[in-house]
Image (cartoon, rainbow, N blue to C red):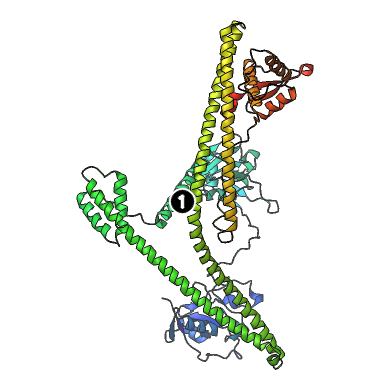
Amino acid sequence: MFLVQYTGLNQLPFDPANNNEPLQFGSASGPLVPEGLIENGGESSKKRKRTNPPSGKLADNTRTLNVDSAAMTLPVSDPAAWATAMNNLGMAPLGIAGQPILPDFDPALGMMTGIPPITPMMPGLGIVPPPIPPDMPVAKEIIHCKSCTLFPPNPNLPPPATRERPPGCKTVFVGGLPENGTEQIIVEVFEQCGEIIAIRKSKKNFCHIRFAEEYMVDKALYLSGYRIRLGSSTDKKDTGRLHVDFAQARDDLYEWECKQRMLAREERHRRRMEEERMRPPSPPPVVHYSDHECSIVAEKLKDDSKFSEAVQTLLTWIERGEVNRRSANHFYSMIQSANSHVRRLVNEKATHEKEMEEAKEKFKQALSGILIQFEQIVAVYHSASKQKAWDHFTKAQRKNISVWCKQAEEIRNIHNDELMGIRREEEMEMSDDEIEETTETKETEESALVSQAEALKEENDSLRWQLDAYRNEVELLKQEQGKAHREDDPNKEQQLKLLQQALQGMQQHLLKVQEEYKKKEAELDRIKDDNLQQENCGSRLCASSQEGEQPLEKTAVSNPVKSEREALLVGIISTFLHVHPFGASIEYICSYLNRLDNKASYQIPSKLTTSPLLPISTSDVESLMSRLQHTFRQEMTGVGASLEKRWKFCGFEGLKLT
């Protein structure tokens, strides 16, 4: 530890007013400040002298403020004493490292008033060099080497231009070398910047130098702009102007990428270690199944405090597949033990619910008491606001009473709304219990109707598929008839008649099923309307329970075929268009239907129809086909004047879409 010996506030051995001799700060080995520092300004050009007189002469000839051993010793670790000593000397109280001891130091309070304070950090005392201003230009000097001399560039010229620094650059480009320059001269000049790994010299007065570290490149760039001269020769081949710039090398880039990858690996490792440190500890591993462990788990299952741990172990064993014929009885006993806790959990839940109800009741009673007291306070304010007592209060008192009354009424209304909300919730809970009982019976009735509707829908689909099958048979027979060109074959005609009759019967049956389906649907809608009316009557009591309910969607789709005659036309048109795969115009279809109506062999029996076939118009046929978009499709064929609308049969595609 450094110790400072201080002589205290003793009287000085000389009178400053009558003595012109200089004041010297000295020690036993000599003066701390040389004589040259205290000379007058006119004599500053003289050489500074450092005198070391003997100790005897020093005591006789000079008036000094000595630091002797007889004085009191103050350790630096005592900041108060150290600050007091430096303050008395007119110095800023600073520690050895330069940190301020007294932040609010006033130099005018010291013994040496009028003298600027001396600090150890002042430039010129040799402790810390003076800082260099950042905008001060660096003065370049002549550099002498063994074989050459480097002359600095003109300081008034702008600095030489450089390219963008490549990542991890350790290689520089050096141009402007003398023609007679050798690799030894290049090494002699640039080895001052750092260790050189490789030099690649060209015959065109330039070279590439690769250093060991990146910071050496910055030192080499300092030499850019220098004029080089070999020896004392002034020949043009022995002179040149150096130009140093960054160079891009594959080795530098490779080393930089390796370094970046290493840093990335270190960062990933650091993050992984941080994640592992912050990760919660893993649960203890589940032991493997054995008879001994099974008995331990069975005992834990009976204990309420260890039940959760034992159940987790049992679940893991069952998922691992430890259950077999030999251990089935043990597992059954453990499952039975787990089941025995169900009653306990139900009782605990009931206990907590009872406590919650008691707490609610207690809270409601306390809230009612608070409301009563608020009512009393508000009544006091109202009675004070009457004219009998109001006239005796001052203006400020009336203002305070009115403000207090308004605040009390607002708080009372808030608590009253809260109490009413609690009561409404209790009433809604009671109404929900009653509504659940009635809704169960309604749901059973609705589910029965829905099941009947689904059964009718399935029957309708099956009949539709049978109808499509009969249509396909008719089309196949038509194709065979067209191939054989036997229109007069009685067997074919008889088969066609039978198929058409079967088709008509299927259509009639389909219409009957559709009518029954509509009746069931109407009945289901009526029941739903009744239920909605009943629900609307009780919506004030159970508004929250009715928000999630939605009416059942209609399962039936409006039927585009409105009569038996239209169903018959659909079957005939489908058969006709299926035979014509390229489609047919609406006039062609209507002419075929009218011709078919005139033929006695193709007339529909009167037993199967309720009215005779009327003349068929194109508008009726076109409107019917446009309603059946999944059965018929209209396309435009031809170009220009031959443009024509054709109808095609797409029933099989419609079945896939539906």
Q: Is residue 593 visible?
A: yes
Give the quarter of the image for residue 132. bottom right
Q: Is residue 562 above or below residue 42?
A: above
Judging depth in this view, the residue of 65 and 288 nearest the camera is 288
* Residue ID for mark 1: 267
Corner quadrant of residue 576: top right
Quarter of the picture containing the N terminus is bottom left
Is 610 displayed left or right of 276 in the figure?
right
Q: Quadrant of the C terminus?
A: top right
Amino acid type, residue under disc 1 in the picture: Glu
User: Residue 620 versus residue 642: which sits nearer the camera?
Assistant: 620
Residue reaching furthest to the front:
607
Q: Is residue 201 above or below residue 224?
A: above
Please give the name of the residue rendered at 55% of the width and 67% of the height, measured from the top-left corner: 424
Q: 21 or 640: which is nearer to us?
A: 640
Left or right of residue 347: residue 562: right
Residue 186 percent across, percent down from the top left: 55, 43
**Callout 1: 10 Å neighbours few (<14), some, many (20+)?**
few
Percent coordinates x, y for residue 47 in the rendering: 59, 71
